[in-house]
Image (cartoon, grey):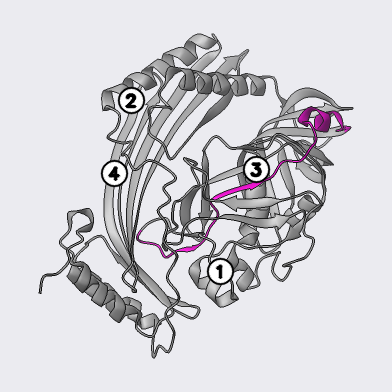
């Protein structure tokens, strides 16, 4: 009998035989799949007037999963062959035991494609990448005599995935990713400060290496560096804070987003556990996780279990109305999967993760929000942050922030950190701007040792009573 050869990544796997092994693996289980992945990535760093590093990485492999109740059996390999999958099956089967489960309903089919399937690594000649980075370096240095160092990075990758389901469904997705970053160091009177800017998304490199784009990125990096050159030590204490639109939504991502992932709530470890239908934020606060925005860094046509991505409302007018779910946690909680089952690579099992998480805008002009700040901080740029999801407590460092007194924006400050907890911060939102914006495409999210690209966004917000860590006054 002739067999069907589906040949993912030019292997000789026969779909009929592979499917037979998969079905044997998940017999008596609740769910499972074979996840195949091929990825290549390239990064070029131009630093101090020359190419500092140029790297190219390629990998491929598979992950085989069997899920029974709360238990997951997972095995992976870099060798994509029938014999390797059969060996992996023996390991994954250990989670099933005596079985008794009923295979979960397959994810619905979709033909949606939210981004190009072209390869951005191969789409632009290597010499063009080098020449563009050299032009960025020269341009940034010529902008201001105080520039003493420039670093520019171009990165591109392509990820191809096949997901074979036990009912016979074969789902595929091709995911590009590109990014340009520019960092500038300036010096004046012996003082040095830095500034950086950049971004990207699921696009080709052509838009990022267009002169009108990289010139604006370089100018913004320089602007931030010059602002920091004038910065004074940040005050310390409790005060009201205005957050700018766009990237400051990373605070929302950390302080609230992680706490709304299904696994933390099913296990009761989230500060939001058991609060479905309750008021958890100020009136007017509506927060979504949306993986369906074309070309965005956090978007996915389908998640890593084959579920189409969704536009999911998490908090509506301050009321908790939804969690982000993968298939396992959705089944155990008696709800539908939301398209948030994500994994870093074939070597990792999926779990509930954010995509693009943002707050909808309100009806107040951003300048009026700043004008209403009597004594506080106006924070428009953030660096690193961390959160304890069990209590929502967070700490964030500001990369660009200003003193505000009686509604007037004053001197920039350095060394400011925002300290608080997500539930209190969300209930202390006093004004919501009409300028909702998404970040430029720079987000990475870590959870349980796995990293995935994400997006964030928000309008200008005023939050009352945050603790500012800075210099004691």
Q: Residue 335 location, x and y as percent?
A: 59, 71
Q: Residue at x 55, y 44 (%)?
A: 455
Q: Earlier in the sequence, mark 1 or mark 3?
A: 3
Q: Position of residue 426 (x, y in %)?
A: 77, 51
Q: CA distance from mark 3 to mark 4?
A: 31 Å
Question: Which residue is label 4 attached to?
Answer: 57
Quadrant of the frame with the C terminus: top right
Q: Residues within 10 Å of mark 2 (few under 14, many from 20)?
A: some
| Badge 1 element | loop
Q: Who is closer to the viewer here, 72 or 281?
A: 281
Q: Which residue is mark 1?
A: 336
Q: Of callouts 2 and 1, which one flags the residue occurring earlier in the amino acid sequence?
A: 2
209 to 286, vertically: above or below: above
Q: Disc 3 and disc 2: Cα gap in Å?
A: 31 Å
Disc 3 to disc 2: CB gap under 8 Å: no
Q: Look at discs 1 and 4 and give the one toward the viewer.
A: 1
Between residue 321 and residue 472, name the one nearer to us: 321
Which residue is denoted by mark 2 in the rendering? 129
Residue reaching furthest to the left: 1
Question: Marks 3 and 4: CB-CB under 8 Å?
Answer: no
**Residue located 29% across and 74% down the image:** 22
- Left or right of 405? Residue 449 is left
Vertical arrangement, residue 24 with respect to residue 441, above or below: below
Is residue 65 among the parts visible in the rendering?
yes
Q: Quadrant of the N terminus?
A: bottom left
> What range of the chain is rendered magenta?
346-374
- How far is the residue under mark 2 from the one under mark 4? 17 Å
Task: Determine the secondary structure under disc 3.
Answer: helix
């Amino acid at each position: 009998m002739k067999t069907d050869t589906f040949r993912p990544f030019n292997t000789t796997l026969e779909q009929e035989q592979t499917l037979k092994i998969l079905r044997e693996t998940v017999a008596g289980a609740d769910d499972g799949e074979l996840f195949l992945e091929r990825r290549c990535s390239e990064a070029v760093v131009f630093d101090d007037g020359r190419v500092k590093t140029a790297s190219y990485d390629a990998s491929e492999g598979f992950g085989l999963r069997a899920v029974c109740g709360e238990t997951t059996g997972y095995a992976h390999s870099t060798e994509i062959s029938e014999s390797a999958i059969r060996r992996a099956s023996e390991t994954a089967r250990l989670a099933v035991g005596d079985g008794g489960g009923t295979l979960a309903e397959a994810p619905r089919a979709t033909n949606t494609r939210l981004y190009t399937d072209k390869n951005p690594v191969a789409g632009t000649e290597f010499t063009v990448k080098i020449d563009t980075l050299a032009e960025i370096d020269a341009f940034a240095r010529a902008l201001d005599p105080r520039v003493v160092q420039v670093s520019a990075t171009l990165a591109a990758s392509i990820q191809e995935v096949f997901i074979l389901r036990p009912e016979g469904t074969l789902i595929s997705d091709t995911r590009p990713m590109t990014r340009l970053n520019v960092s500038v160091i300036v010096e004046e009177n012996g003082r040095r400060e830095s500034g950086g800017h950049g971004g990207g998304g699921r696009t080709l490199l052509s838009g990022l290496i267009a002169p009108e784009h990289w010139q604006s990125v370089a100018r913004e990096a320089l602007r931030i560096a010059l602002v920091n050159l004038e910065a004074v030590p940040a005050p310390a204490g409790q005060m009201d804070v205005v957050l700018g639109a766009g990237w400051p939504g990373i605070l929302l991502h950390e302080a609230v987003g992680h706490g709304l992932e299904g696994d933390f709530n099913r296990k009761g470890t989230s500060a939001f556990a058991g609060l479905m239908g309750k008021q958890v934020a100020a009136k007017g606060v509506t927060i979504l996780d949306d993986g369906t925005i074309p070309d965005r860094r956090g978007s996915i046509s389908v998640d890593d279990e084959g579920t189409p991505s969704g536009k999911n409302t998490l908090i509506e007018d301050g009321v908790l109305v939804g969690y982000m779910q993968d298939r396992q946690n959705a089944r155990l909680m008696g709800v539908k999967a939301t398209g948030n089952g994500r994994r870093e690579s074939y070597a990792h099992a999926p779990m509930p993760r954010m995509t693009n998480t943002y707050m909808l805008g309100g009806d107040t002009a951003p300048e009026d929000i700043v004008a209403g700040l009597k004594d506080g901080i106006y924070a428009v740029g953030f660096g690193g942050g961390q959160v304890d999801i069990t209590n929502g407590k967070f700490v964030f460092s500001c990369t660009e922030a200003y003193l505000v007194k009686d509604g007037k924006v004053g001197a920039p400050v350095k060394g400011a950190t925002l300290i608080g907890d997500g539930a209190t911060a969300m209930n202390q939102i006093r004004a919501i701007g009409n300028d909702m914006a998404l970040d430029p495409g720079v987000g990475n999210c870590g959870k349980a040792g796995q990293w995935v690209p994400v997006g964030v966004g928000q309008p200008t917000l005023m939050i009352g009573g945050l603790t500012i860590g800075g210099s004691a006054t």
